[in-house]
Amino acid sequence: MLPILVMGGFITAQEPAVPPAPATPSALVSLQTTVGGTAQPAPVTNGSLRQDILNGCSQQEENSRTTTIVGTPYPVKASSEGPFSGAITLNQDSFFGFYPILSGSYSITDRIAFTFYGLFWTNPGFSPTGTGTGLWTEFGFGVNFSLFDGAVSVNPAIGYLNGSLLSGSSRATVFDGIVAQISFSHAGKYTEGQLYGAYYIATSAPSNNNFVHWWVTGGVRPFADRTDWTQIFSTGFHFEQLYQTKAKVGDTSNIYTWLGPYVQITFPNSIFLRITTGWDLQDRVSSSFYKATMGFAF
């Protein structure tokens, strides 16, 4: 945005008292203006005026560019100011339903940060009664390591679950299970991607259900250098799998295997929306899938 300065009163040029000196390539260009009857000198050099214009254009171009954000349920922002950063995401897909996530990190050093998250599953099918009471609830803590000058971040974490999905109990309990997880994320100027894996293990009786959940995404920002509306877009692929390693009823099996493209919109204020659709290669739950993640990284 170009700044606009509004001043009250009339602005008129005043003739100089003596003839000006002959101009040279580096001479000062002097203009006196009368604002409300008071003479005000406004000396400007040709060189400084040119530099101010270039600096202003450069700043305007820099401010118009978006920040790369890995728009997965656990987003990663390319850069952050201050020791604290965080994200709020609203997620929904064709299997898990609706689940908001709050995540954050606090820098310990330039390359190490303490991380934490809270995941609030709202699918009533994950509760013991199927009515929405005793909903599955997940919290976790970890450590993030920034590598290769911030191009890659590695975040191992441990979480614990409350509810009854993993144990298979008829009542919701505290410490229903634990989840060991790790993510590798990349948020560059032109590229973005994430590899995430988690193992959900039941810790309460009767301890019936264990799961492995993982995904990999990779995409490009082809218009990252542009200053028009095209800079907000990125696109890529998404592969995700959910495998049940221990089952209350029946054999262990692959629940779904998703593969498909995504399109992401990221605004300069770090609000993002990622839409992913594609095929369920397992074709057990459905022949297709959809997933949407919208959030704010700060």
Image (cartoon, helix red, strand yellow):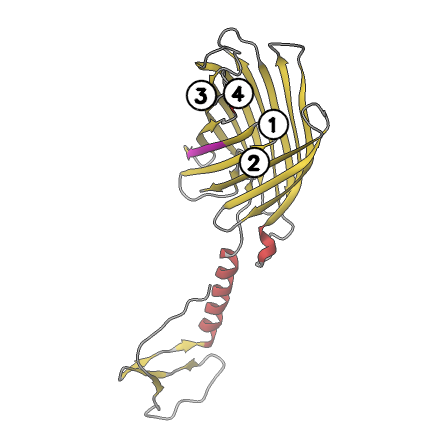
Quadrant of the drawing holding the C terminus: top left
Going from N to C along the chain, the mark reached first, 2 or 1, is 2
Give the mark count: 4
Q: Whole-Å distance between the Cαs marked 2 and 3?
A: 27 Å
Say what secondary structure mark 3 lies in. Answer: loop
Name the residue beneath numbered marker 2. Answer: 72
Q: Against 296, is 283 above or below?
A: above
Disc 3: CA contacts within 10 A as few (<14), some (14-19) or many (>=20): some
Q: Whole-Å distance between the Cαs marked 1 and 4?
A: 11 Å
* Residue in the image at 48% along x and 32% along y: 101
Q: Which residues are magenta?
A: 100-106
Q: Amino acid at mark 3?
A: Thr
Say what secondary structure mark 1 lies in. Answer: loop
Disc 2: CA contacts within 10 A as few (<14), some (14-19) or many (>=20): many
Disc 4: CA contacts within 10 A as few (<14), some (14-19) or many (>=20): many
Question: Where is residue 167 drawn, in percent x and y?
Answer: 52, 11
Name the residue beneath numbered marker 3. Answer: 133
Name the residue beneath numbered marker 4. Answer: 126
Residue 225 seen by the camera: no
